[in-house]
Image (cartoon, helix red, strand yellow):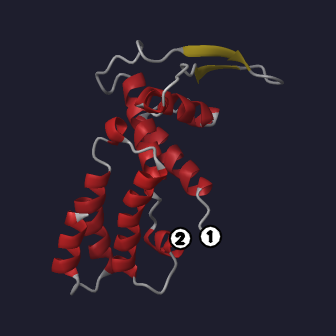
Amino acid sequence: MNIYNLLYRTCKEISDSQVKKTLYISWVRSRLEYACQVWCPYTKRNIRALEQVQRKATRFIVGKELSYYERLKKLELLPLVYRREILDLIFFYKCLNGICELDISQHVSFVFIQLRNLRSTDNQTLSVPFSRTDAFKNSYFIRVCRLWNGLPLHVRESESLAVFRRKLYLLYNGKYSYE
């Protein structure tokens, strides 16, 4: 929030919304999303507090006339909740395909599923470990197993990181209906 306040104080004379958007993304949002695989908030209070920063920033960039959803649409931004999910999935894809040197085989395992009414199988489904506590329920590997299993098969079976990222952003842009 302090970085946003600094941005607001020093750049309120700038009238170009693209410049303000670039400054917000590089200064503020990058800090809000830094290492979100490790510290991702799961309580509604913390999620709302982070989203409030983006609400204020979009109001600063576009103006107060539009609603929050209209401002996001105009700026082509997603809510921070979706951004964190996308970043979780991209990091998992990197680990799964050897782009990132993290051995995830100790933490996740795949389940073989025969798809109904199709002649193919889905060998990209993860088994979700059982968890008793909220802290473990919302840990990265539990969270990403649920997110990964919720993706369509054509997204999970992407042949490269660039294709995966593009399909993921298309999916989330379609998923988020600007009201």
For badge 1, the amino acid type reads Glu
Q: Residue furthest right?
A: 117
174 lies left or right of 23: right
Q: Residue at x 39, y 78 (%)?
A: 59
Q: Tags 2 and 1 in contact by the CB under 8 Å rule?
A: yes
For badge 2, the amino acid type reads Tyr
Front-lying residue, 76 or 29: 29
Could you say whether the residue bearing mark 2 is in a helix, strand or loop? helix
Front-lying residue, 116 or 61: 61
- Residue 50 in percent (x, y) is at 37, 58
Quarter of the rendering occupied by the C terminus: bottom right
Is 37 placed above or below 46 here?
Answer: above
Residue 127 in which image quadrant = top right
Q: Which residue is mark 2?
A: 69
Q: Reading the chain from its start, which is encountered first: label 2 or label 1?
A: 2
Q: Residues within 10 Å of mark 1 (few under 14, many from 20)?
A: few
Residue 77 in which image quadrant = bottom left
Q: Residue at x 48, y 39 (%)?
A: 164
Q: Residues within 10 Å of mark 2 (few under 14, many from 20)?
A: some
- Residue 115 in percent (x, y) is at 75, 22
Give me the disc on residue 81.
none
2 lies left or right of 80: left
Is 37 placed above or below 104 here?
Answer: below
Q: Which residue is mark 1?
A: 179
Front-lying residue, 15 or 160: 15
Q: Residue at x 84, y 24 (%)?
A: 117
Q: CA distance from mark 2 to mark 1?
A: 6 Å
Could you say whether the residue bearing mark 1 is in a helix, strand or loop? loop
Quarter of the rendering occupied by the N terminus: bottom left
Q: Residue at x 64, y 13 (%)?
A: 112
